[in-house]
Amino acid sequence: MAGVFENGKLSKAAQILDKAAGHRLSDIVAQGDISGKAASTLLLQKVPGIAAERVLLVGLGKYGEQNSKTSIEILRAAFNALGSTAAKDAIVYLTDEDTGKNAAWVVKQAVLAAAESGYRSDSLKSKPAKPVTLKNLILATLNKPAAGLEAALHQAVATTHGMKLAKDLGNLPGNVCTPSYLATQALTLGKKHKSIKTTVLEEKDMQKLGMGSFLSVTRGSEQPAKLITMEYQGTDKKQKPVVLVGKGITFDSGGISIKPGAEMDEMKYDMCGAASVLGTMQAIAEMGLKLNVVAVIPSCENLPSGTASKPGDIVTSMSGQSIEILNTDAEGRLILCDALTYSAKFKPDTVIDIATLTGACVIALGHVASGLLSNQQDLAQELLTAGEQVYDRAWQLPLFDEYQPLLDSNFADMQNIGGRAGGTITAACFLSRFTKDYRWAHLDIAGTAWKSGKEKGATGRPVPLLTQYLINRAGK
């Protein structure tokens, strides 16, 4: 696999191949068979002078104008083209010139692109799709590999494994991926990695802890709620952990405030926060990161029934604060607030919650960036930087005190919605009332955790962002 720029200039790797092939490649480019436009491809068979059975020419765009977006599009196009062949082995030549990025960045993105092109979600089909034939991928440099490339490769592979777990869980239907199923997956990870200790609390345990807000959401379901904790110890016990809190609503009908029927099937993805936390825990355990991380996953279903919570009900959270439930479809914050209070028991350095929390975030940011809000600007910047590093980007929204009065209630300490205006912000304002004792950030992944339409499915985001953030933390 080698590159061609728009002006017909061959990449350094392609020039070497061209010389071996008696300038056959440059002749093909001169004939106009490949324009060099970014992400265009041309597959050549049995090129004389080259031992490989196939040579894939990939358009790199205008020389010197590559950026993160085009570079990733180029890699994805290349692996999609390879996936349409019967090739079992492939060599990708990496040079900084081709992408404008350093080799470590390209290695990570190449591995992520290869994994994405080979991913299938057909385990429940009677006739699964034909598996991808590509088995071995060699990432080659023209010069001696730069320091750190091996670590970058190891981290990238671990990240893809975490993303696969997150996507697999997100794509499973609600009748398979229940709170109990998530708990089983967490216990399995604990058995697989000795560095992870998994604990599952039952509803009776939550009642003793006073988690009235969390339990109010599960009242309409026959599936028992679970509070899953996973403690990863990668360094000295004295080091304060980073706590990741993942929303695990395995199906969200909206409860008594029931959602419209159209596209309600997508509400099986309302546990993608939990899935991304599980995926991140797998990735860092595989990497063996030298830091301590705790996962806290509140999981239940939100369904209507004769026992379900009703609009106007008032419940008391684990923190002792009372909440007037004006809309039962604003349930994610009701389970997260008790999980955030519970997280304080781990004496955390930092707490990050990840949730498909608000449709308002999709309206604000579309499906490109995750929403980010935080009570500490330095933490927000650390997450933004990690997202840019791996191109799993987030965008910060304000958490001004002026938004807080929108949550005022006539009958309780607060209400669970603040109206249509600034819905993503007021949801975060609600959560902020339970996070005053530690550094905290909130990632709203409602627009980035899955794709709708023809390509419907979980994306595995924000596993890359979270893993890169933790890699950066471990590096410090």
Image: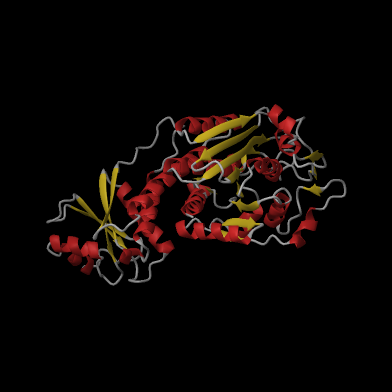
Quadrant into which the N terminus falls = bottom left
Q: Nearer the viewer, residue 379 or 256?
A: 379
Disc tally is: 0
User: Where is 222 relative to 426, above or below?
Assistant: above
Q: Nearer the viewer, residue 295 or 50?
A: 295
Q: Residue furthest right?
A: 410
Q: Tell me which residue sits at (70%, 32%) in the image.
A: 206
Q: Tell me which residue sits at (57%, 61%) in the image.
A: 381
Kindly indicate the quadrant of the structure image that contains residue 309: top right
Q: Nearer the viewer, residue 213 or 54?
A: 213
Q: Is residue 144 visible?
A: yes
Kindly indicate the quadrant of the structure image that contains residue 21: bottom left
The percent coordinates of residue 77 (x first, y second) are 36, 55
Q: Is residue 220 visible?
A: no
406 left or right, relative to 363: right
User: Where is 223 relative to 171, above or below?
Assistant: above
Q: Tell me which residue sits at (21%, 69%) in the image.
A: 30
Q: Tell me which residue sits at (79%, 48%) in the image.
A: 415
The percent coordinates of residue 417 (x first, y second) are 75, 50
The percent coordinates of residue 397 (x first, y second) are 64, 61
The image's colour scheme reads: secondary structure
423 left or right, relative to 92: right
The percent coordinates of residue 344 (x first, y second) are 67, 43
382 left or right, relative to 56: right
21 left or right, relative to 287: left
